[in-house]
Amino acid sequence: MSKNHFKSVLNVFDIFSINFHLRIFGEENYKSKSGTFLGFVTIVAIMAFSGIFIIELFMRKNFSIIYNTNTNLIPRIDLTNTPIMFFISDKQGKRIPKDGIYNIEVKLIKYPSDKLSNKLIYSNIEFEQCNKEKHKLFGEITTYPDFSENLCISPGKQEKILFGQWKDVQKGFSGLTFFINKCNPASEKCREESEIEKYLYDFVVGVYYNSYNIDHYNYNSPKVMKYQSNGNFAMSNTLLKYYYLNLSQVFYETDYGLIFEEKSLEDFYVFESQKIDINLQPKTSNSNVSLYTLGNIILTCSENISFYHRSYGKAQTVIANIGGLIKIILILSKLLFEFFTRKILIVDLSNNFFKLSDVQEEKNDNKDNKQKLNSNLPITKEIINNNFAPNKLYIAKNERDRLRINKYLSSIFDIKFDFLNLKFEFLKRD
């Protein structure tokens, strides 16, 4: 067993060893101007991005939305408090007089699921001539010049609830239906047939009602009320048309919590689609279609119920994002600059061990040493070790010797001294 190996074995039992730290220029960590600048830039970048995250958190700009639909539940839309307006006019928009020409019936048709053996249940819905003072809930549409010529269904007086699906009778359904009929002389006083045909040969029916749009960016409430008009529905005395206006029920849940959950649920409806059916069967006394039926407009439920979940960012999520951002910035900065910092450290250490000089001639007491360095003999490790005396300045005058000395010094300090295309002469400091 060698002496050194025996010593290392004995050192294992030294429980009173002393920890020590190496210092560079009196500091435990090497710091450079370039590292200081990069650190300042890194701190500013972290503070800037963190500030953006925090501002967006409190301004509630960022949110996520989850959307899905459900066809198993029975949709239910309440139009009881919804103002509805409708009219009949010619293609130029001029209102057609009602008396003696046509009549309109508005009914809520129900087919309850617990009474499948019964017939459809019809509930008459009352309407009246529109009045600007009486129908203020209609909003800005009351300012239209021809508002008082229309017919209005006042909100809140009668229950108008749409539920179920038309395609699934077993679950029951209901629909708000507008029946447009030609004047029947058997039951009411009508005008001349030629005059009625003139008015009803080609006409339009307009239906307006309160509906909603979805605004995901509206922080206070995602539902935005609007006065829905699906255009004017073309009808005539020759073809029987059925217009279906499908409304879709929406459940919109929003989590407003900054740290903990604070959920708010809103239930409303939106217009989804429109469908038209045209009956091409001639209206005769032998057909199933009444000679005096012109068409129907039906408000009904869509098959789908839409579910939205909107969630705003939480403080803990922002803190985690900031922590991840800081780690990424530090890793990138370290990868980017650690290599250069190590090289600068070596250069600083070398400059403290050796002195750079462009002096071509320097008096030296040891002429033999100077001659050896400037000779054409190969520069070896022994020559440099033997001829570099303490407190002396030596100069390599030719390029070959300078490169050989630098090569030797590079092997000591593990650096190429032509780094960044700069050439140095490393000589011992006086």
Image: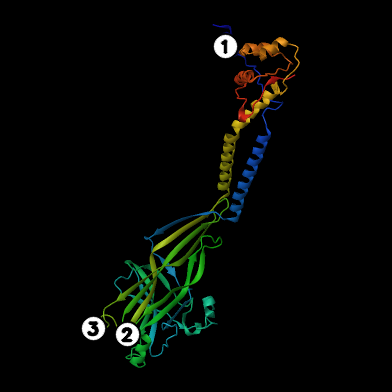
Q: Which residue is mark 3?
A: 286
Q: Quadrant of residue 89?
A: bottom left
**Neighbours of disc 1 within 10 Å: few (<14), some (14-19), many (20+):** few
In the visual, does 94 lie left or right of 1?
Answer: left
Marking on residue 203: none
| SS under mark 2 | loop
Image quarter (top left, top right, bottom left or bottom right) of the C terminus: top right
Image: 141 above or below 265: below
Q: Quadrant of residue 372?
A: top right
Query: Marks 2/3: CA distance?
Result: 13 Å
Q: Which residue is mark 2?
A: 292
Kindly identify the residue that appears in the image at 38 percent across and 90 percent down: 100
Name the kind of residue labelled 3 in the image: Asn
Kindly identify the residue that appears in the image at 56 percent across and 42 percent down: 324
Image: 102 above or below 13: below
Query: Marks 1/3: CA distance?
Result: 118 Å
Kindly identify the residue that appears in the image at 61 percent across and 52 percent down: 55
Instruction: Give residue 377's position: percent from left, percent from top.
Output: 62, 12
Kindly identify the residue that appears in the image at 42 percent across and 86 percent down: 96
The tag earlier along the polypeptide, 2 or 3, is 3
Task: Using the rendered image of the protein, determine whether residue 240 is visible from the camera's viewpoint.
Answer: yes
| SS under mark 3 | loop
The tag earlier along the polypeptide, 2 or 1, is 1
Q: Which residue is mark 1?
A: 9
Image: 63 above or below 86: above
Image quarter (top left, top right, bottom left or bottom right) of the N terminus: top right
Query: Marks 2/1: CA distance?
Result: 115 Å
Name the kind of residue labelled 1 in the image: Val
| SS under mark 1 | helix
